[in-house]
Image (spheres, coloured by chain):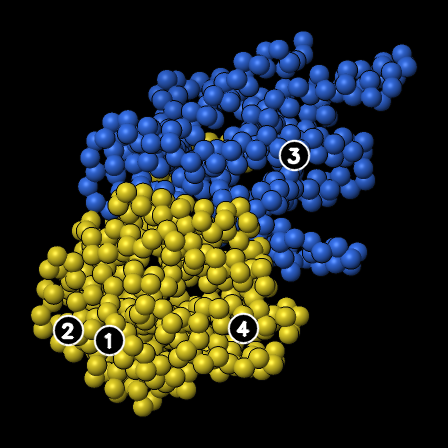
Amino acid sequence: MNIPYGGARSRRLAAPIALGAAFALLASACGGGSSADSDGVVELRYSWWGADDRHSTLQQVIEIFEAENPDIRIAGDYTDWGSYWDRLATSTAGGDAPDIMMQEERYLREYGDRGALADLGEFDGVLDLSNVDPLIADSGDLEDQTYGIASGVNVYAILADPEAFEEAGVDMPDDTTWTWDDYVEIAGEISEATDGDVVGTQSMSYNESGFQIFARQHGENLYDEDGALAFSTETLTEWFRITEDLLDNGGQPGASQSVEIEAGGPDQSVLATNTGAMAHFWSNQLGGLTESSGRDLELLRYPGETDNERTGMYFKPAMFYSISAGSDHPEEAARFVDFMLNSNEAAELVLADLGLPANIDVRSHILSSLPAADERSAIFLSDVEGDVVDGNPPPPIGAGEVVEITKRVTDELSFGNLTPEEAAEQFISEVESATGSA
Amino acid sequence: MSALLQRSPKKSDPAPTKARTAKGAKGGGTGRRRQENLAAYGFLAPWFLGLIIITAGPLMASLYFSFTDYNLIGDHQWVGLENYERMLTDDRLHSSLRVTFVYVFVSVPLQLALALALAMVLDRGVRGLTLYRSVYYLPSLLGGSVAIAILWRQVFGAEGLVNQLLGFFGVQGPGWVSHPDYALGTLVVLNVWTFGAPMVIFLAGLRQIPRMYYEAASVDGASAVHRFWNITVPMLTPIIFFNLVLQIINAFQTFTQAFIVSGGTGGPSDSTLFYTLYLYQRGFGSFDMGYASAMAWLLLMIIAGFTAVNFLASKYWVFYGD
């Protein structure tokens, strides 16, 4: 900190130097942000969420795309599901949204309605949407604008580890007939037989997608066409009661442990760590979880599909490819989306990780080359297809907040701060205020 | 910070003298002075621009946004006091205030007490004082960091180090950060652990108390307790006051630790939902930036209020010596 005291000459220089340095700092702070290099290569940013294996796969896909399109460079920008939405909101607000982003149905409207996403219908000749499975082709449309195009099809189901069942000496259930009582009972048996070393099931009420199936089994749904809540308090109470039963009989980990498991994401799930027999996941996560668990996991239909009013399972657009409305290079971004959606090369790497590919030709192309796990999920999807009654209306704006509300209410329920009835009431009132349907 | 406190009297002295002598010797005029001023402003410019662009600008913008329904992405409308009115009925806001107040009122006194106690031990002339000082100061540098918060989550996890240690004694510890009854306490411990910064300041303060007071008191037969309460504490009140104001402000602004330890949720069941964390959730999770801005201003008011009360009350207990 000792500034040597110089002569008159050095002092005369001091002012210009200081000012110069200040401006240099300022200039460097304002620089950056320009995305076209002098050599004409366009730089794009592509953001997604996921676990480790998805990150490395998508990086490989990007490399292939760059090799074929030397005029475009793509920077991958990835994180886990939890921080993805915070980061996307922040960067979008700062006018620095990624050019291409993965979206999800609960958030798509939030961004689309506010003008943050480009209309994908406007890239004729660049982005070919003609081969997309009609089941989900317009799932990203809102008011005649295509804000997102589905990457693939997904179904919410139970992932089971046959080895864990074997370890506990419990038979795998027949998932075409099992009831919710069976589910609770089996989970309890597994925990008991292994003395808690292997729990029966991971807590299921942290994700509202499961309840959506349950509500549909009762002839209700999570949201109706207008985005209002479409289920009764009794149904939700009953849903929470199942979790309470599982806590009582030890079929699922205790409250505090569940909090830690949930915070860890799929890589810390009871399946990945070989400490549980069942967990609720999207079918596209089978591949990743098979890898991290080192076991041949299987997909099971939801319990209660046959002994209730109707079946509840449904197909969901796994994720959406969206392009930022503020992108400087929408055409190039659309070329990349086209590559992700329609190229066999990309699909051969991604396989079913972003859902079973939406492009029907691509899907049939990779079906033969799918590794065992992804093939099982493809077969499972086609098995279930006959039972799926209908799809779901798009969730209302604010549905993204429901993710957090669900977690919070489940925590309260698990720690015994709320009864199932109270949990149902709190969930309903919080969701109504978040989605503005009160 | 300690370095500044200790050295400031020495440091500020010689510089002006030198300047004066230089001017006297070389007979510089007003032109040189102006040039010197210009240089000073030049060197100040980066900081000053930073203040305007990075601090003052956003501050004013957030005041404006607090009266709008700004949602981060789209346009915004003026809504008057609506955001402030909504705060009155927001249960989660109230529970976040409760969590934050408990945190401030428990962790700050504990932290300062520990800091003072260790400062007094070190002041007795321990061999290797500089080493101890650095070692104890280290957590203050690291405490607010993401890495430490992640480490903390591991150490206090259900299967973490703490519970493994407890296991040796046959005690089955709870999941310290994943149980609503213990999570906040764990964060309090994390804050108390960063006692190094106030400790170093206390140490500097203790060094300035003239030894003769203690000698005189000992001659008169005062016990150690008496010496502490009647010499150390009164002489140290300006330092205590300084630390208190600073640590209260810091504690109100706690964010990183809670964000990382709870995975951004403030969970389990909102037990670590600090005010700043809830503000962040409203702003960036729920796109409710207008409301979040209003919350930021409420926090500013609260901190300003506490600081003002502190300064007013200081008249009655802080002793600035002769």
Query: What is the quadrant of residue A286 in the picture?
Result: bottom left
Residue B124 position (above or below residue B73):
above
Tag 1 or tag 2, which sits nearer the N-term?
2
| Of the image marks 2 and 4, the number of the one nearer the N terminus | 2
Select label 3 or label 4 by which is in front.
4
Q: Position of residue A340 (x, y in %)?
A: 25, 74
Identify the residue position indicated by label 4 in the image. A186
Residue denoted by label 1: A358
- Residue A14: image x %, image y %? 39, 34
Callouts 4 and 1 close, C-beta under 8 Å:
no
Identify which amino acid the numbered label 3 is placed on: Gln
* Chain B, chosen colour in render: blue
Between disc 3 and disc 2, the foreground one is 2
Mark 2 is surrounded, within 10 Å at the Cα level, by few (under 14), some (14 to 19) or many (20 or more) other residues, namely some
Query: Which residue lies at the image location 25% right of the left edge and 33% below the top edge?
Result: B68
Element on which disc 3 rests: helix
Q: Residue at x 56, y 66 (%)?
A: A251
Which chain is home to disc 1? A
Q: Where's the C terminus of chain A, which quadrant?
A: top left
Measure the alpha-carbon separation of dots 2 and 1: 10 Å
Mark 4 neighbour density, 10 Å: few (under 14) some (14–19) many (20 or more): many
Q: Amino acid at mark 4?
A: Ile
Q: Disc 4 on helix, strand or loop? A: helix
Badges 1 and 3, same chain: no
Measure how far apart labels 3 and 2 are at the Cα level.
62 Å
Q: Secondary structure at mark 2?
A: loop
Decide which of A67, B179 is in the foreground and name it: B179
Amino acid marked by disc 1: Ala
Q: Which chain is yellow?
A: A
Q: Nearer the viewer, residue A219 or B297?
A: A219
Q: Are discs 3 and 2 both within one chain?
A: no
Could you give the CA–CA distance between mark 2 and mark 4, rounded to whole angstroms?
A: 45 Å
